[in-house]
Image: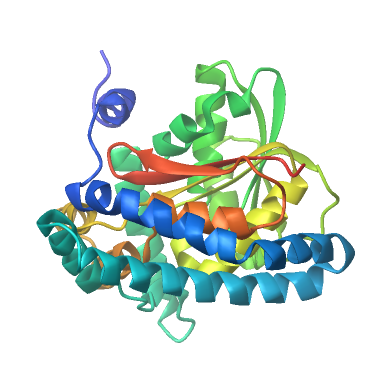
Amino acid sequence: MAEGPQVVESLHPLLHGLPVPAPTAILALAPLRRRLRDELLQRERARLARLAGAWEVDRASARAELAALGDRLLDEHRHQAWARAARGSGVERLAAAVDRRLFRQGAELMDDPSVDARVRGRIVSDLARVNDLIGSYWSLLRAAGPSLGPGPTTVLDLASGHGGLALWLLRQGPRRGLQLQVTATDLRDDYLDPARQRAARAGLPLQTMALDALAMDLAPRSYDVVTCTQAIHHFSPGQVAVLLAEARRVARRSVVFTDGLRSTRQLGLACALFVGMGSHPASVHDCAVSVRRMFVPEELDLLAALAPGGPGAHARFVAPAFVGLLAPAAA
């Protein structure tokens, strides 16, 4: 009989299969956000066509323009959504008021090099424990659909850090009939030391590579699937658009990004979980900052539409508390 961690892990597919609806505030604002997204894309249609052409010729210059455009348009999208909802129904007004107070672009201690390395290490450790407990990485498997198989599949994982998703995929692959070869990446090679150590202890064939996810020095279609999970809120909106464009260029099949969802439900439950597990105060701080920086599906849809690579990218709520973005490889 399975016990301890095995029992918890065996419950993860059940937990992530529950028909949990999106938070009410997310649902209430979704139609308005979609309309506003479409208006902004229509207005910027000529510029986006020119940017897509520039991407093929000079990616360095196009990246800078795309990042600036993404930052500006998502900021406009958020503020216009709040302003229009304030003139809408009672439910829309309440949802907008809640989201406006919730959203903050704070700084996480884990990203601050001036914070003691032992504290940052503890934050990473606490985050790994929480992700393992709630089975966060199942959200990526659900968002990916059939992208990870059948047959041998190479996976490039961006912003891997301690290697949580990369190692989870290597463990889950054989159990689910998937033939995965996973490469974990991060901006600096030393960021990947914990991933390598965990892989060695577990006997898992993890590959690692230092890589700037915003300017990948890789040939087009180098990997079957490009992933990124629990990390895109660390990037600015414009950087997310660049990240997706780079990922679609490198992917042969698809790109799968997942992250937590910006909502009061997520904020309350996540912080309560960190506190309940005896996490370091710095970890609780970063939990709150992270949730308030996260995206909602329509925001990711807008950023995906800005990124060169052709149509087909789509973001959606992934129960119980995540947002997933699935995009085909660049056309």
Residue 128 picture location, percent across and down? 38, 51
Q: Residue at x 29, y 44 (%)?
A: 321
Determine whether, in the image, residue 89 is placed left or right of residue 112.
Answer: left
Q: Residue lying farthest top?
A: 1
Of 91 and 290, the residue lying toward us: 91
Q: Quadrant of residue 180?
A: top right
**Taking 271 as reference, is 17 left or right?**
right
**In this rendering, is residue 130 above or below 12?**
below
When the figure is inspected, residue 277 is found, relative to residue 109, above or below; the finding is: above
Report the residue at 27% width, 18% height from top.
2
| Image-based side of 327 in relation to 111, left or right | right
> What is the basis of the colouring in this image?
rainbow
Q: Is residue 18 above or below residue 283?
A: above
Q: Position of residue 285 (x, y in %)?
A: 26, 72
Image point (33%, 65%), residue name: 81
x and y, in percent, of residue 130 in the image: 30, 49
Report whether residue 236 is seen. Answer: no
Q: Quadrant of residue 47?
A: bottom right
